[in-house]
């Protein structure tokens, strides 16, 4: 099916077109530049920017793919989770398009779309394998999932109990004076640092949380990054109290190693213990060079086949929404229709409305 996907959950206005598992086009307009001076996304500014960007982004996507609205088989839109006002712009636009064209409309989950974009990879010519694992690492979420069926059955194996990985990157970048957005800045600076310079804590890895395979502890596959952020803040205070120049690159690299080490080791553990032999990496933090490298290394060592989408499909975009929409259509999902609301805290297990 030819599916148009619309994304507006945060600061990216995305429109993508997918035919089955084939990517036709992925057009994104970001309002990030307008948020930089505030050090974070301002919801009202993001919503207004979506309003301005939607029609030009849609026109560009249709032109690039040489497709007209009449050709579409379905329209998919992110209905949550995300910023309410921002979501409402994309959802209203999608409803208007569906009403005007008579095309079926599907309200889909942004988080599952981050993972579902993996189907566009040529690694899955015959569809997704059964018992597929997914590691979702984004600005608001850090989750280990088992995807029994992308459209109907996504199971949560573990998640962060406090900050998301991307959030930790952004907070630590602020502490280190690296500006916003923090993830790409730390990734860049860390390449010149020694990742073993400082041993930062790995959250929820003590035996009382891990337990054993037979008797899992309460947080065997869960993450915690707020203690790590505090440890970085204390470390910086020590250097400042001593009047020593801050070894920014070493701190960034050591922080990054702590995040990536615990994420990859717990993910491989969860895969092993659930018989998962194929893993999809998704979410904005999947753009991180160290996360990509260590996940690849540890998956290879554990005999897990890893699929990582290209960078442009990791950060928020419309193609991922179209890709998930196409999966739902191909699996016989019922269209949502026009009567649905946005849900800023939609859980990952709720694939579509
Ligand atoms: P969610 O998808 O959970 O609703 P979101 O849409 O805001 O949240 P994404 O767009 O998926 O999140 O990802 C944005 C996050 O990814 C930010 O926290 C950003 O710092 C982080 N990020 C982007 N590039 C990198 C990188 N190279 N290294 C580390 N983090 C990165
Ligand atoms: Mg963004
Ligand atoms: Fe996202």
Image (cartoon, rainbow, N blue to C red):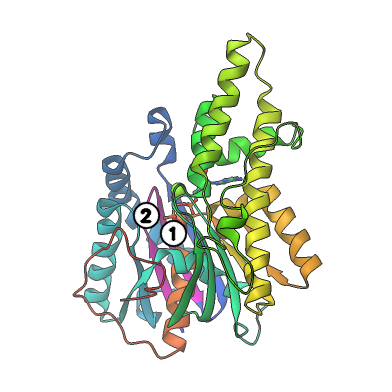
> Mostly what secondary structure, the magenta segment?
strand
Q: Does residue 261 appear anywhere in the picture? A: yes
CB under 8 Å between discs 1 and 2: yes
Q: Residue 280 placed where, x, y %?
A: 62, 69
Other residues around mark 2 within 10 Å, as few (<14) / some (14–19) / many (≥20): few
Q: How many marks?
A: 2
Residue furthest to the right in view is: 301
343 horizontally vs 132: left or right: left
Question: Is 13 colored magenta in this rendering?
Answer: yes
Residue furthest to the bottom in view is: 332
Q: Does residue 176 appear anywhere in the picture? A: no
Judged from the image, the secondary structure of the residue bearing numbered disc 2 is helix
141 horizontally vs 274: left or right: left
Residue 247 versus residue 24 in the image, above or below? above
Tell me what residue is drawn at x 27 percent, y 63 percent: 343
Q: Residue 62 placed where, x, y %?
A: 43, 67
Judged from the image, the secondary structure of the residue bearing numbered disc 1 is helix
- Quadrant for the C terminus in the image: bottom left
Tell me what residue is drawn at x 52 percent, y 40 percent: 227
Q: Nearer the viewer, residue 129 or 69?
A: 129
Residue 297 versus residue 117 in the image, above or below? above
Tell me what residue is drawn at x 46 percent, y 84 percent: 1
Q: Residue 286 placed where, x, y %?
A: 60, 55
- Marks 1/2: CA distance? 6 Å
Other residues around mark 1 within 10 Å, as few (<14) / some (14–19) / many (≥20): some
Q: Which residues are magenta?
A: 2-18
Say the numbered circle drawn on residue 60.
1
Say the numbered circle drawn on residue 56.
2
């Amino acid at each position: 099916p030819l599916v148009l996907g619309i994304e507006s959950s945060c600061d990216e206005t995305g429109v993508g077109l997918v035919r089955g598992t084939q990517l036709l086009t992925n057009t994104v307009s970001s309002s990030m530049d307008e948020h930089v001076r505030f050090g974070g996304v301002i919801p009202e500014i993001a919503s207004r920017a979506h309003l301005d960007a939607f029609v030009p982004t849609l026109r560009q996507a249709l032109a690039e793919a040489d497709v007209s609205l009449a050709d579409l088989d379905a329209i998919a839109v992110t209905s949550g989770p995300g910023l309410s006002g921002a979501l409402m712009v994309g959802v209203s636009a999608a409803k208007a398009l569906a009403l005007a064209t008579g095309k079926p409309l599907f309200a889909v989950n942004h988080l599952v779309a981050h993972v579902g974009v993996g189907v566009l990879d040529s690694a899955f010519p015959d569809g997704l394998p059964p018992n597929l694992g997914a590691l979702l690492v984004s600005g608001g979420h850090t989750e280990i999932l088992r995807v029994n069926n992308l459209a109907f059955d996504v199971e949560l194996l573990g998640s962060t109990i406090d900050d998301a990985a991307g959030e930790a990157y952004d907070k630590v970048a602020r502490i280190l004076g690296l500006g916003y957005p923090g993830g790409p800045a730390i990734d860049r600076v860390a390449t010149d640092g020694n990742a073993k310079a400082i041993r930062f804590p790995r959250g929820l890895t003590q035996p009382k949380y891990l337990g054993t395979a037979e008797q899992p502890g309460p947080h065997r596959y869960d993450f915690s990054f707020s203690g790590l952020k505090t440890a970085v803040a204390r470390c910086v205070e020590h250097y400042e109290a001593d009047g020593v120049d801050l070894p920014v690159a070493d701190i960034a690299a050591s922080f990054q190693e702590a995040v990536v080490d615990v994420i990859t080791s717990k993910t491989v553990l969860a895969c092993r213990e659930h018989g998962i032999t194929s893993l999809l990496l998704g979410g904005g933090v999947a753009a991180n060079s160290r996360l990509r490298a260590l996940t690849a290394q540890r998956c290879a060592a554990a005999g897990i086949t890893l699929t990582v989408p290209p960078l442009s499909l990791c950060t928020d975009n419309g193609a991922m929404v179209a890709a998930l929409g196409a999966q739902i259509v191909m699996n016989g999902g019922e269209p949502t229709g026009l009567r649905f609301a946005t849900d800023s805290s939609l859980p990952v297990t709720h694939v579509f409305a």
